[in-house]
């Protein structure tokens, strides 16, 4: 009998933790939408290399400026400019491609095939662990959200080929961006070679 009660307790507790994790992500998603256009400063580590930069986000569009690359995404097309090579690759990106640049990407995918549970939260942040399945882009995603305003502080994505960690350093809401700032302008880079991979 005790074993049965223990199994029921564990089952109910797991459901409660999952619901709590999703509720926290729902609040983070609502807060992000309310912030409008945002500018986020961050540090990113991928394949043992660390860089800093910022990203401007307006709905599903963004411009990301890093030390070695600039990336524009207008909602459909991505331009990836490698500064050292003076080359721009033009692609139609996958969800995984977009996630490598955007600290807030998880707010658009957590309901699509991921199991969510609470991680090792502290007095300063909630930690949510998202576990993917066979059809998801990532095997796991760890997100830490500020307890006061639900802004992301840290994300870690793990896939078969890479692990990417992003630490958010600054968050400026209600920014104003021109629509053209999310598209690569070849007139501003006359010496750049454009490689269309679409």
Image: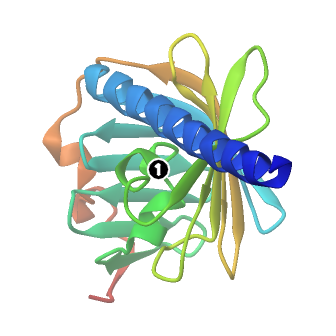
Q: Name the residue located 20 percent from the left edge and 66 percent from the top edge.
A: 76
Q: Quadrant of the C terminus?
A: bottom left
Q: Where 153 falls versus 130 (above or below)?
A: above
Q: Is residue 191 left or right of residue 6?
A: left
Q: Name the residue located 27 percent from the left edge and 60 percent from the top edge.
A: 184
Q: Nearer the viewer, residue 124 or 49?
A: 124
Q: Residue furthest front?
A: 1
Q: Nearer the viewer, residue 115 or 138?
A: 115
Q: Nearer the viewer, residue 56 or 185?
A: 56
**Quadrant of residue 100 in the image?**
bottom right
Q: Where 107 falls versus 37 (above or below)?
A: below
Secondary structure under tag 1 reads helix
Q: Name the residue located 22 percent from the left edge and 56 percent from the top edge.
A: 74
**Quadrant of residue 160 in the image?**
bottom right
**Quadrant of residue 46 in the image?**
bottom right
Here the colouring is: rainbow
Asked whether the viewer can see residue 43, the reply is: no
Q: Which residue is mark 1?
A: 106
Where residue 122 sits: x, y (%)?
Answer: 79, 22
Where residue 158 sits: x, y (%)?
Answer: 68, 66
Where residue 118 sits: x, y (%)?
Answer: 66, 39
Where residue 88 sits: x, y (%)?
Answer: 40, 74
Q: Residue furthest top?
A: 148
Q: Residues within 10 Å of mark 1 (few under 14, many from 20)?
A: some
């Amino acid at each position: 009998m005790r074993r049965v009660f223990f199994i029921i307790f564990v089952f109910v507790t797991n459901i409660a933790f999952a619901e709590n994790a999703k509720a926290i992500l729902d609040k983070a998603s609502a807060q992000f939408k309310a912030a409008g256009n945002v500018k986020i400063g961050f540090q990113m580590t991928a394949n043992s290399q660390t860089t800093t930069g910022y990203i401007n986000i307006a709905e599903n569009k963004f411009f990301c400026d890093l030390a070695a690359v600039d990336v524009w995404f207008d909602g459909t097309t991505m331009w990836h400019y490698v500064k050292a090579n003076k080359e721009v690759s033009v692609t139609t990106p996958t969800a995984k491609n977009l996630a490598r640049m955007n600290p807030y990407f998880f707010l658009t995918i957590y309901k699509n095939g991921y199991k969510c549970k609470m991680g090792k939260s502290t007095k300063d942040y909630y930690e949510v662990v998202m576990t993917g399945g066979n059809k998801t882009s990532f095997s796991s995603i760890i997100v830490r959200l500020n307890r006061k305003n639900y802004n992301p502080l840290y994300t870690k994505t793990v896939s078969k080929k890479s692990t990417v960690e992003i630490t958010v350093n600054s968050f400026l809401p209600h920014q104003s961006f021109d629509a053209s700032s999310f598209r690569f302008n070849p007139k501003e880079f006359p010496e750049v070679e454009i490689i269309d991979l679409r």
